[in-house]
Image (cartoon, coloured by chain):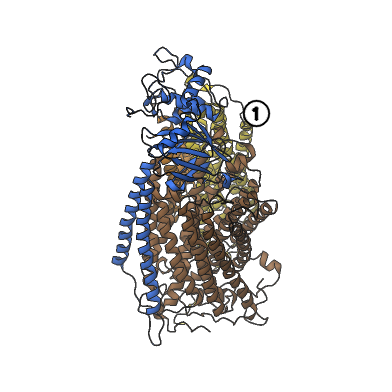
Chain colours: A blue, B brown, C yellow, D orange
Amino acid sequence: MANNVDALYIFLLVVSGMMTVAIFTMVLVFAVRYRKRPGQRAEQIDGSHALEITWSLIPFCIFMVFFAWGAIIFFQERKPPQDSAEVYTVAKQWMWKFEHMEGQREINELHVPIGRDVKMIMTSQDVIHSFFIPAFRIKQDVLPGRYTVAWFHATKAGTYHLFCAEYCGTMHSGMVGSVVVMEPKDYEAWMGGGGNQPLAVTGEKLFTELGCVTCHRSDTQGRGPNLVSIFGKLVLLEDGRTVVADENYIRESILQPGAKIVNGFKPIMPTFQGQISDEQLNALVAYVKSLSQAPSGQTGGRKMATATP
Amino acid sequence: MATAVLQSGERETYLNKEYGIKSWLLTVDHKRIALLYLVSITFFFFIGGFFALLIRLELLTPAGDLVQADTYNKLFTMHGQVMVFFFLIPAVPAVLGNFLIPIMIGARDLAFPRVNLLSWYLYIIGGALMLYTILNGGVDTGWTFYTPLSTEFLNTHVVTAGLAIFVAGFSSILTGLNFVVTTHRMRAPGMTWSRLPLFVWAHYATSIIQLLGTPVLAITLLLVVCERLFHLGIFNPALGGDPLLFQHLFWFYSHPAVYIMILPGMGIISEIVCCFSRKRIFGYTAMALALLGIAVVGFLVWAHHMFVAGISLYAAMIFSLLSYFVAVPSAIKVFNWTSTMYKGSITYQTPMLYAFGFIGLFTMGGLTGLFLASLGIDVHVTDTYFVVAHFHYIMVGGMVMAYLGGMHFWWPKISGRMYPEGWGRLAALLVFVGFNLTFFPQFILGYMGMPRRYWDYSHSPEFQILNVLSTAGATVLAVGYVLPMIYFLWSMRYGKPAPDNPWNAAGLEWMVPSPPPTFNFEEQPVVTWEAYNYDEIKEEVPVAQ
Amino acid sequence: MHNSPIATADQEAHQNPALLHHFATEEQQKDAASLGMWVFLATEIMFFGGMFCAYLVYRYWYFGDFGAGSQSLSVVLGGTNTAVLICSSLTVALAVRAAQLGQQKVIIICLILTMLLGLVFLGIKGVEYHDKFVEHHVPGPGFHFPGHVPGHPDIPINQRHAQIFFSLYFIMTGLHALHMIIGVGLFAFITYNAMRRRYGPDYYTPVEVAGLYWHFVDIIWIYLFPLLYLIDRSK
Amino acid sequence: MSEHVSSLKLYIGIWITLLIGTLVTVLVAGVNLPGPLNAVVALTIATIKATLVVLFFMHVKYAHDKMTKVVIVAALFWLAILLALSMADYTTRLWA
């Protein structure tokens, strides 16, 4: 991704550099060549539509290349690959909290292996922040009240800056961290250290503790929709609309159950707004997602080779 | 005050017609109001500039050691708010536009002189609120007031700052209203639309933006104030609101606001380039249409400030595409100015030096805008110093250069005195060099990834060298800005009396005495010539003294 | 100088005392005033436009809660107010007509009627605000809006979303009411001048321009009424 | 300065039409129409009423100067920009 962005950047730099040089040269040459001389008068020219059209159309065509190329890169940036490793991120004044699917938690430091697509699923507890890793050329604002997503694919081991790029109050400039990119084996070693509970397992426990499981049963008898395999699917709503059951939809359904009722069900679910933390919410979302990743309901599924949309 | 310029017993001008504070504070003469504005915006310019210098000094070293984090946040916030709303937006329209538009179209005053005075008082009330905010400890929302930070999380004077800008906004609306009606209704016989100086066209286009954009900012700030006072939830995600709605409404005005700043500058440059090339403008129609085109298309691009903010992918693509449409008329303007010089008879007086600078810096600012409009690159460079550099190239490199160029060009008309040409050229050079030294390194910093609004970058010492360069440049720039103020003041007393038309320039404003009488024209002028009729003007520019 | 300004224009023409120094003719002055007001109204459209935009977004998001909020408003009072404003628009139009025809007494009667109707509107608005206050429908810590979404007896109203509806309701109608108050003030001034027989067929610009403003305020209400009072009424 | 003076009859006619329009809006709002039709009808009536006010009460129909119309159209056009491009974001956010 970084290479694509740099390639476009260099292309833009060269093209606009040439334009700049051309204009500067013309200005300078005219300024010297047509400086005031005794007895010589300016030659009046009204203009030329042909020229004007030329120097509108040619730049316009170049601009369209800028647009299209940039749009293609952006489109890729906004579409994380299906089998990415997922890291749930909670931003708050003024720190980054990460939670891996395997259950590792980190603050202001993010460990990732080389060669894996990593998808950041991010939300904020307070104000708007922005997740910015200059080395990977990615940036995404992190908003309170919803998820935003960014992804990257690190190719070189090392430690990289992580910045908050959206002004977020007093210690905005202190909301920095680092991304540690490791060789896969080092990463496995780092991972193995904890004996952590995978995020989806945490979520499954919460799912039981909060009583979700009494209605959202894994058969067709529940009072709530069966959640197995719903993630990523289109859901038909009671008012006839359809939505994609993505992270934001699951989040909204937990916090505001009445907002988008699935067709054929009654709006009987109580709200969990203000009752669970962002971290618990993330765990629940991770659990619901895990239900779609393995037919057996196996949790924490990360290397699902079969996962297809 | 400039009342002491002329000795009594001389020809009556707008300056010496009446004396005393009251004759200024209650004046309805557009020229006097322009001078009231000149004094007030200069005051705010130096306040904003002072904040800028403190910012640059803080960034000299990576650690946050000169001021506290909160202080730094207030500095860049108030630098932005003061400069944008109290200098950049009113500067050219309210000073030069106010002074010149009626004269350029052959009118005795603007259509609504009392509204014009009211507009200045609103500016002063807004400015007083801003000063109150500053003196009471300031505000640290960033000039953009992003919610929910500004509404729920900060303990500074957000309400007074918001109201200050709200009131100043109405000043801007009234100025725009006056210009539109004046341009439509007050033109002298024979002054057809195709004979209007581009300066007037530029202000007409600017006024459209002021009229149709500013109210949206006003209501947005009002909502922010209500949010802050009553916690309604309209922009607060914790209460079901959408912070992006604030950004949409804010940028609906604040992107076109950039054109409020730059379009009048483009008008000035057109006048200057023609005069000092002794030529008619290349492609008058295209130039006028480009101004209107920028004003209209400028309203279709605002969400390019929000590509990474969480808006829909498809909306982002639409806004990126539309952003390139606004680049076309800008490109036309640059090419046409350059072509105007072709086969001219060019002299290098101070205003022309500023015009050269403007064309160069505006080109660079505009082209880096293309980088930001390109989605793939914007993701990386938005909210970094790349953006800071880009908009300073447009606003300072573009607008301030044009403003200074215009001030030098029309100073003889305004004050009746010549400024010292040698000092003028020196200051122009200092501004150009200082500006590039300050802001060019920031493009590189931005691509390296330095986020804007960072008080402390001790985690990234590699940013320091470029920051040192930038701070060094800022000191040069500061000298370049102080100099003109000193010699303008000096020239009011000691400058050579200016002839009516020191540059042998075309245009009605050069046919009235310097300084003009109160009602501009003793008799109603009738226009029988095209704009920029330099072929009909016999004399060349007098060689500088 | 190759081209000096040439004198034209007969300045001797009958000088109306209301003609300001910088205008060449009365017609120019009148056209400027009228265009000025129209341009001002254009800015007003954008001023309310920002709020219509916020309204549109949240109505799109929270349609059910907006419907519930809307049903709690009184159509009778809102509709009456619409009628009151329409009547006041008529009286303003008649005031302008009377000025055009020089019917001094009619001008004054129509203007006073207009102000009275304006005050009636504000009074009814005050009653509505008072009701909302009593019912705890005013956004803030005491906000309480029980009930269910129209047509969905089992979906309870989301308090926060309903609060956004009422926030917009109060801000939009509040700003509208502020415009009304300014309008009444304007007419009070103009009535005073009308009593001094300032207006007639030769000069009635202030009456006309203030009338434009009043009609505009009426039009805003013509939209506010269905947008705020008539969402999802049928369920 | 020969301004158009409308007849009393016309003013009264417009006034009655406006009142009827108001009544119709209220009545139609009580009927459950399919889809978004209720809103469409309400806004259509509102627009008709506003147009009548603009054309006859505000004398735009008789304006000798086309600038008035240009100003109205411009303001509505800009309002449309604001609403349409904002909604371009909101309506497409959930698209996959």
Q: Which percent across, then down, holds residue D77?
A: 42, 48
Q: Secondary structure at mark 1?
A: loop
In which chain is the residue bearing label 1?
Answer: C
Q: Residue at position x 58%, y 64% from top?
A: C20
**For the view shown, which residue lies furthest in the top direction?**
A221
| Residue positioned most to the bottom | A39
Question: Residue B363, how many percent across, how many down?
Answer: 42, 63
Residue B284 is situated, as x and y percent measured from the top left of the image, at: 38, 68
Q: How many marks?
A: 1
If the image is split into quadrants, where does the N terminus of chain A sit?
Answer: top left
Q: Percent position (x, y) of residue B122?
A: 62, 56
Residue B207 showing in the rendered view: no
Q: Residue at x 37, y 60 (%)?
A: A16
**Figure quadrant of residue B226:** top right
Question: Where B398 falls versus B306 (above or below)?
Answer: below
Front residue of D79 and B49: B49
Q: Identify the residue at image location x=48%, y=84%.
A: B542
Report the side of B15 relative to B104 (left or right). Answer: right
- C221 and B215: which is toward the camera: B215
- Quarter of the image that includes the C terminus of chain A: top left
Residue B347, by quadrant, is bottom left
Instruction: Tell me, yes or no, if residue B447 can be seen here.
Output: yes
Tell me which amino acid carries mark 1.
Answer: Gly
Q: Is residue B280 left or right of residue B545?
A: left
Q: Residues within 10 Å of mark 1 (few under 14, many from 20)?
A: few
Relative to D85, is B180 above or below? Answer: below
Residue toward you, B428 or B318: B428
List the residue tagged with mark 1. C142
